[in-house]
Image (cartoon, rainbow, N blue to C red):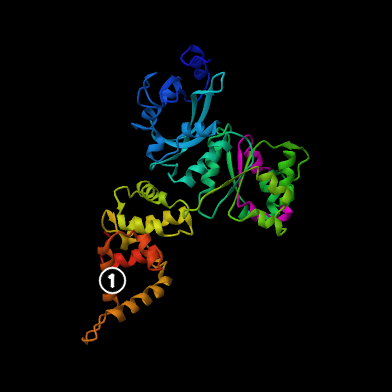
Amino acid sequence: MIIINNATVQDMIDAIDKPAIFINTQYTILAVNQAYRATYESEVIVNRSKCFEISHNHASPCDQHGEDCPIKACIDSKKSSNVMHIHNTDLGKTYCDILMKPVKDNDGMVIGFLEILDKINYASAEPQQNKMIGHSLPFKHMLTKINRAAQADISVLLHGETGTGKELVARALHDSSPRADKPFVVIECTGLNENLFESELFGHEKGAFTGATHAKKGLIDIANGGTVFFDEIADVALSMQVKLLRLIETQSYRSVGGLKQRKANFRLICASHKNLLSLVEQGLFRRDLYYRIAGFPINLPSLRERSTDIPDLCQYFLKFNKNGNKRFSDEAITYLCQYPFPGNIRELKNTVEHAALLANEDVIEFDDLPEHILEADNRTDNSFNKQWNEHQYNAISTDSDVIPTLEEVEAEYLEALSKKGGFTIDDLASKLHLSSRTLYRKLHKYGIKLD
């Protein structure tokens, strides 16, 4: 049998360079290294402190507070597990990639768990400058992939809609890698001139072509030892893709007009909002190049997929764009969370700045939102008005010559539904065959709130 509280366990914990603890099946910390102690403000008392007390300031395990418990996952699967948690560290609410490994005795019985933390410095669950912000499940899944890829030197392909933050993710991959102290070079493929492709990437010698009055270093040379980020790689012409493939495969190149073969030393990250595999099937992108750059694909979720992050992102953009004294009303935030944001985070940023400028008070109201967002769902109004027409017909008294306006009937009907209670906006919108945004806009128009 393994003796849990002997020096061997402590030696094992001390040998780990990341924050680490050894926990028993009752969540009690039996061993801890100095890196773990330095991570949290709460003091760790061996054989007494519970892991959730130190990391979350909770009085019960994580799964009772809406988070996945890695210990429960280990017990169920009998294997190691990992989760992305938000911990209360000395730096505030910090993301931690937790690896939990079950420790068994000679009879195969689990006697405890080794927990190793990897602190995520490029993301936060609360507004912090120059960090990715969010707490939704798709956001956490993305962080896990970023963290795992950053620790290797594998080629990464980022795929996501325009405005999802691909360059920010590429920067996070670089800053969290062993190459962090070396250059991070961005190559905008969309604007890369085919005639100057080799000159831009590989540099040229003096006199190599007309106008080459002096030697020039290429971007690959500038990035030596660091990371090269090819943004919108799908826009590279087929003729240039051959040269790019050769660079990646041979890790060598020659400057234009030069004779000396040079070694290329860089980590490759590519990004595209287009479906590269579809382009491969159409013959517009080389299959061999695709498999060279897609060693570790990471999908960036759209803002529609992580709409619960919108309130935090709004607060972030207000705080760090000289509007920190302003805030959105509950009504405005609710509406923004229901808008699809085809331009994703970039569009949200512009929307927040626009609304902040329009707002006369510190509270940004529903009416301060840009017109294109307020009018985004006008197409659904026809079906909505049809229902009110039917209700109006049934509501008119045959003994009266007074005919209520459509708006009066609409307001009366919504008021009656709101007093009935038991509906969320989404529920009621579904029953009325409307989008939530259209219904919300009409409730706001008549000053009606659901009970």
The one nearer the camera, 314 or 303, is: 303
Any part of residue 195 in sight:
yes
Report if residue 224 lies within the magenta region.
Answer: yes
Residue at the limit of the structure toward the front, as seen here: 107
| The magenta segment | 212-240
The one nearer the camera, 42 or 127, is: 42
All told, the count of numbered labels is 1
Question: Is 146 on the left or on the right of 250, as rendered?
Answer: left
Report if residue 319 lies within the magenta region.
Answer: no
The one nearer the camera, 160 or 214, is: 160
Where is residue 21 shown, x and y percent of the image? 46, 23
191 in relation to 1, above or below: below
Q: Which residue is mark 1?
A: 413
Where is residue 25 shown, x and y percent of the image? 45, 25
Residue at the limit of the structure toward the top, as seen here: 7
223 in relation to 4, above or below: below
Q: Residues within 10 Å of mark 1 (few under 14, many from 20)?
A: some
Q: Residue at x 48, y 16 (%)?
A: 4
Q: Residue at x 60, y 39 (%)?
A: 227
Where is residue 230 shown, x and y percent of the image? 62, 47
Any part of residue 212 in sight:
no
Q: Secondary structure at mark 1?
A: helix
Residue 205: name its quadrant.
Answer: top right
Question: Is 208 on the left or on the right of 228, as rendered?
Answer: right
Q: Which three-letter amino acid code belongs to the residue tagged 1?
A: Tyr
254 in relation to 61, above or below: below
Q: Residue at x 22, y 84 (%)?
A: 402
Q: Quadrant of the C terminus?
A: bottom left
Where is residue 195 shown, x and y percent of the image? 70, 55
